[in-house]
Amino acid sequence: MGLTTWKGEQVRKTDTAISKNYLTEAEVADLNRITTMFLDFAEDRARRRRPTLMAEWVAQTDRFLSFNERSVLSGPGRVSASAVEQVIADRYAEFDQTRRALEAEQAAADEFQDLQELTDVERRRIDRGESQDGH
């Protein structure tokens, strides 16, 4: 799936829709740093009682990112959210099918190993001349 992080032991479908789950550790650290800086900036404006409309926040965010020498997306991007959701759904379905097949193979191998162990125990018991009731 290409994810680098997810909650729990297994990747869930909900994990695949979270963009930051695909980031490297360094990229997450950068994201956290720039987010903290921006929140400090926003808090400072609020403490100074600087009213800001939503449209102004968009401009402030772009200015903030440019000031910090970060890329700013212009326009809506090239891929729609619904197209991304479809790709994620298709890839997750394939991933999940493969994972379930591997889990089934592992379960069958574990069952076979358990049967082998039980067979070995029974053979040793028979070799010692024990009956089924333990005598």
Image: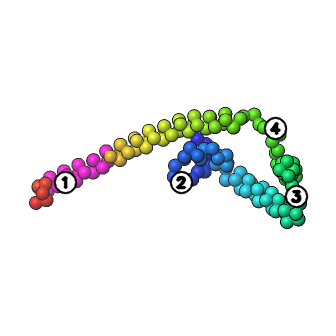
Q: Is residue 114 magenta?
A: yes
Q: Nearer the viewer, mark 4 or mark 3?
A: 3
The quarter holding residue 87 reads top right
Which x, y percent locates residue 56? 87, 50
The answer to the question of whether label 4 and label 2 lie on touching residues, with beta carbons closer than 8 A, is no
Comes first in the chain, label 3 or label 2: 2
> Which residue is identified by label 1?
124
Distance (Cα) linking label 2 and label 1: 42 Å
Residue 62 seen in the figure: no
Label 1: which secondary element: helix
Label 4: which secondary element: loop
Which x, y percent locates residue 29? 71, 56
Q: Please report the residue visible at 58 percent of the width from the left and 37 percent of the height from the top.
A: 89
The extreme bottom residue here reads: 47
The answer to the question of whether label 4 and label 1 lie on touching residues, with beta carbons closer than 8 A, is no
> Which residue is identified by label 3?
51
Query: What amino acid is labelled 2 in the image?
Result: Gly
> Which residue is identified by label 2?
8
Label 3: which secondary element: loop
Comes first in the chain, label 4 or label 3: 3
Numbered range of the magenta stretch: 112-129
Is the residue 67 above or below the residue 81 in the image? below
The answer to the question of whether label 4 and label 3 lie on touching residues, with beta carbons closer than 8 A, is no
